[in-house]
Amino acid sequence: MTTLFFVGHSGAGKTSLITAMVPLFLADGVRIGVIKHHHASLSSGKDSQRLFAAGVPAAVLAADGILRMADAPDLADAIAALGEEVDLVLVEGMKRAVGPKIWVGEGWSPEIQGVLAWVGTNGHKGAFAFSEVGRLYREVVRPMVGKG
């Protein structure tokens, strides 16, 4: 199973970019799973907070056909939870993790390793525009899953 990180600062358009790529993955028959790194607590002020306070170490939250794993011990556990049902795991966030990345928006710095492509108006030579999702998919992402 391959993992691809979509990284950048808050509000840069990471979720929008992933969402725009979903039809391309589906058209190619690529089974994807998405892990969204979230800095704030998913359970703050909610009933689930009471469960965690009572000592529940992890939970999978199910709503509208979506499973959400809260308090996964680490990225590897979250990826494993997706099982063999996916060909490609898209991780939104976790810019310091090891693995191939697409940087979205402004503010990239060289200490962020593994960047395969840049998206947005960050002034990086060769950056893709948000309107070039199809080209980004064909040239960078599709080959990662053996479709290129």
Image (spheres, rainbow, N blue to C red):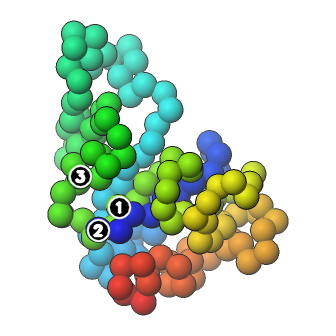
Q: Residue at x 69, y 54 (%)?
A: 111
Outermost residue, right direction? 123
First in sequence: mark 3 or mark 2? 2
Quadrant where the image shows the C terminus: bottom left
Residue 96 in the figure: left or right of residue 66? right
Q: Quick one: 66 or 84, which is closer to the camera?
A: 84
Q: Quick one: 115 or 133, which is closer to the camera?
A: 115
Label 2 belongs to which residue?
Answer: 1
- In the picture, the disc for residue 89 is 1
First in sequence: mark 1 or mark 2? 2
Q: Residue at x 74, y 77 (%)?
A: 126
Q: Residue 37 appears at what percent x and percent y?
A: 45, 42
Q: Is residue 34 above or below residue 75?
A: below
Residue 101 visible to an observer of this rendering: yes
Q: Residue 119 appears at what percent x and percent y?
A: 65, 66
Residue 60 in the figure: left or right of residue 92? left
- In the picture, the disc for residue 61 is none
* Badge 3 density bin: few <14, some 14–19, many ≥20, Cα 10 Å: few
Q: CA distance from mark 1 to mark 3?
A: 10 Å
Q: Is residue 76 above or below residue 4?
A: above
Q: Amino acid at mark 1?
A: Val
Outermost residue, bottom direction? 148
Residue 15 visible to an observer of this rendering: no
Quadrant where the image shows the N terminus: bottom left
The count of marks equals 3
Which tag is nearer the camera, tag 1 or tag 2?
Answer: 2
